[in-house]
Amino acid sequence: MARDEMLTIDQVVEEIGVPRATFYRWRQLKKGPRSIKFPNGSVRIRRSELERWIEMLEDAA
């Protein structure tokens, strides 16, 4: 089974085309994709989770 790519916040905001501050606001409001926060404070989003979240937004539109 292939490993799921782990994206940085910079990669995610570039891909979805929103400012970094918007993404952080969505995270705070629990409206963004699920993310993983590591003990060193870095945050990653699984590629599959980002795609699932985008599909969910498409369904709601």
Image: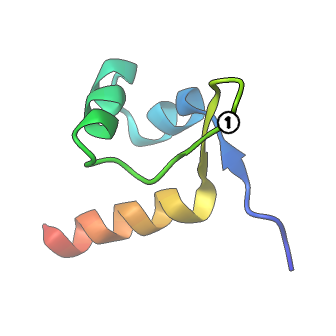
Image quarter in which the N terminus is found: bottom right
Dot 1 crowding, Cα within 10 Å, few <14, some 14–19, many 20+: few
Which residue is painted at 41% across and 52% down in the image?
A: 33
Which residue was labeled with disc 1?
A: 38
Q: Looking at the picture, which amino acid does disc 1 mark?
A: Phe
Note whether 29 is above or below 58 in the view shown.
Answer: above
Which residue is painted at 54% across and 31% down in the image?
A: 9
Horizontally, residue 47 falls left or right of residue 13, namely: right
> Could you say whether the residue bearing mark 1 is in a helix, strand or loop?
loop
Horizontally, residue 21 falls left or right of residue 2, namely: left
> Residue 35, percent across and down?
51, 47
Farthest residue, direction left:
61
Which residue is painted at 27% across and 47% down in the image?
A: 30
Farthest residue, direction front:
39
Horizontally, residue 50 falls left or right of residue 37, namely: left
Choose top left, top right, bottom left or bottom right for residue 2: bottom right
Numbered marks: total: 1
